[in-house]
Amino acid sequence: MAIGTTPKTKLAHQFSHPKLAGIRIIGTGMFAPSNVVKNEALGKLGYDSDWIVQRTGIEARCHVSPGEATSDLSYKAAKQCLERANMAPENLDLIIVATMSPDHSTPSTACILQARLGSQAPAMDLNAACSGFMYGLVTGSQFVKTGCCRNALIVGAEVLSNIVDPEDKKTFPLFGDGAGAVLIAADPESDPEMPSGILAHRIAAVGLMADKLLVPGGGSRNPISQEVLDSRSHYLRMDGRCVFKWAVRLIPDIVDEMLIKSGLEMDDLDVIIFHQANRRILDAAVDILGADPSKVVVNLDKYGNTSAASIPISLHEALIQGRIKPGCNILMAGFGAGLTWGACIFRW
């Protein structure tokens, strides 16, 4: 099957995904740039501000200031996270930065963050776009679960305002900049009967749909050139209708799989955090699932789509708001370019 076709996503898999229990989140943090760009400001530039709200639910987004990069946002979110966890940077065992908008092709943004924090932990970037944080959380949890690390700092951070075409009136308003971070560690007090940590998880990809959301130019396939710049191929391109339909079909299946694997029911979920891409996607998922809307975290109205930063920002805000308490069952699910998706149920 050629790239560009739209295969039905198959969630069945040939091997099981064991629990990653006995892990806890001991700190969270976030950072959003101070430059808040409201729809009204975009309206003055020729964008249809009413269309933005009606089609996406987004009312504002944050953009970096000139000279501000993904590592800067990562540092501020990570610093807050470590302070809240009372963890010194030199005690970190692993740093993962999930991003599709790194400072440079190389070195990794994680290495830049490591140096700025004053840590000596192994550091690596992970690019699964809007699913990046879920990929990072599962990866970091595996290191902690197997005893390879005592703890892991997982950061989702993006500066998307620099990679989305400002002339693309349908795509540019959707995305914002931001960063979220969590610090995970082994939980020596985890109850075997009611364990903390990841009760069910799955990360996956549908590479046959890779061209539905991509940056065509600037990589090894189509290196940066005057032609790439003239055609604006160095900016993100998205088949919004296709991605929207895929996400609406996918989310109910993701949730069903997580509930089956964890042995929980929908009513057992205390907090539901979907990737903040589009309010219509979230509303459709809630309707199909019959979920309690009050349990669903929604903040895309003020941040827009922050890709890999979306879920950790939402998690931090839900915690600060008092929505997350010990023993809570939290569903998290992300989906994006690749096309990739990842989900888990985490018991706090």
Image (cartoon, helix red, strand yellow):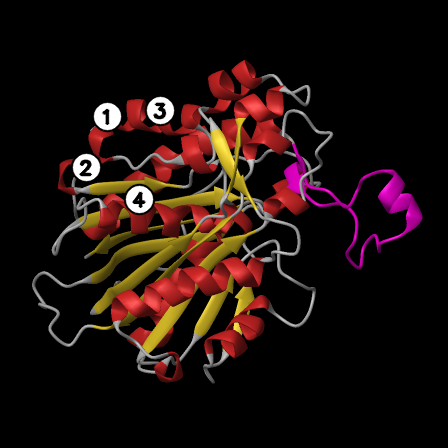
Q: Quadrant of the C terminus?
A: bottom left
Disc 3 element: helix
Q: Amino acid at mark 4?
A: Glu
> Are the residues flagged by discs 1 and 2 in contact, CB closer than 8 Å?
yes
Nearer to us of marks 2 and 3 is 3
Percent coordinates x, y for residue 299 in the rendering: 37, 36
Please give the residue where the numbered disc 2 appears in the rendered image: 266
Label of residue 95 in the image:
none
* Residue 273 vs residue 194, the one in the foreground: 273
Mark whose residue sits in front, 3 or 1: 3
* Distance of label 3 from label 1 (alpha carbons): 10 Å
6 vs 118, nearest the viewer: 118
Which residue appears at 68% of the width and 70% of the height? 106
- Amino acid type, residue under disc 1 in the picture: Gly
- Pointer 3 and pointer 1: residues touching (CB < 8 Å)? no
Write the start and end of the magenta stretch as one range.
212-238
Tag 2: Cα neighbours inside 10 Å, few (<14), some, or many (≥20)?
some
Read off the residue under disc 3: 283
Which kind of residue does numbered mark 2 sit on?
Answer: Met
Q: Real-space Cα distance between discs 1 and 4?
A: 15 Å
